[in-house]
Image (spheres, rainbow, N blue to C red):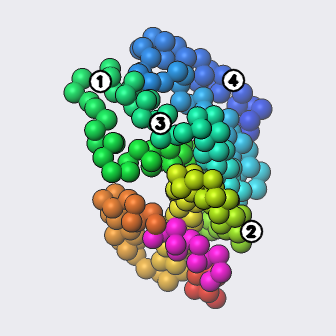
Amino acid sequence: MTMVVLHEGLARSAGVVLMAGVLVVLGWYGLGTPPGLAFPLVFALWPPLLVMTWILRRGGDWGPALLVAGAVMLLFVLAMHTWTDDVVTFWDAWLHRALAAVPGADVKGFEQGSMLRLVNGFVAMLYGLALMLALMLGRWFQFVAFPPGDFGREFRAISLPAWVLALAVAVMWAGGLRDIVMLSDLLMVAILLYAVVGLAVIHGVLFVRGMSSVWRLPVYLLIAFFPPEALATLALIGVVDTFVHFRVQEAS
């Protein structure tokens, strides 16, 4: 769907979006409702994804599109803390309900240590990651199916303005004044957002240096096997790039 909207525009793709929605509803009720879910999750993804698609199609700049994903993650965190008043208790109860229908599953692993305190931020990260990956795959498929287009060039140019970092710090500071769980949630949102920038920086530096794409492999292996450490490191690179501009210096 994302590829079609990117290529044809939202107005001309309305029929495809409507048809996809009908198929999702039919599959949802035909196959049975998964435990713990009240509606198809794609309906929470499509509205912001369509906005991101519209922005990318108009300007070809990934920064504003990624900021939409960041805003959605932020709104999710704030809404959950406002609506539930205690997100840890909410997710504890939700996990008990959802896993009750799964044979042999329990929540003991989540209840150990401080895992439950990270669930809300982790769900927010998954929400934003799903939006970003859907847009990236759609853009890549678009350029493959309807050349010309250079997905690599667009991805390597991803960056965020300095005011975004200042805003992120201010929001995390305000969240920390409320409670430590909100601070953790907001930090996870910022890490994901800037990890994408950091990954683009690595791709960009390797490209301007003329280095083989094999050098990207260690990065993706770290992401696959050590995701928390890898994402934190990439986010740090993305933050530093706000001031150092690695790709500009290397290109010059």
Q: Of the residues under marks 3 and 4, which one precedes in the sequence?
A: 4
Q: Is residue 243 magenta?
A: yes
Q: Type of residue at label 3?
A: Thr
Tell which tag, 1 or 4, sits nearer the viewer.
Answer: 1
Crowd class of label 3 (few under 14; some 14 to 19; many from 20; radius 10 Å): few
Residue that badge 2 annotates: 163
Q: Of the residues under marks 4 and 2, which one precedes in the sequence?
A: 4
Tell me the SS state at disc 1. Answer: loop
Crowd class of label 4 (few under 14; some 14 to 19; many from 20; radius 10 Å): few
162 up-or-down from 144: above or below: below
Distance of mark 4 from mark 2, alpha carbons?
A: 38 Å
25 up-or-down from 142: above or below: above
Tell me the SS state at disc 2. Answer: helix
Residue that badge 3 annotates: 89
Distance of mark 1 from mark 4, alpha carbons?
A: 37 Å
Image: magenta residue range: 233-244
Residue at (28% x, 32% y) in the render: 106
Distance of mark 1 from mark 3, alpha carbons?
A: 20 Å
160 up-or-down from 144: above or below: below
Q: Type of residue at label 2?
A: Trp
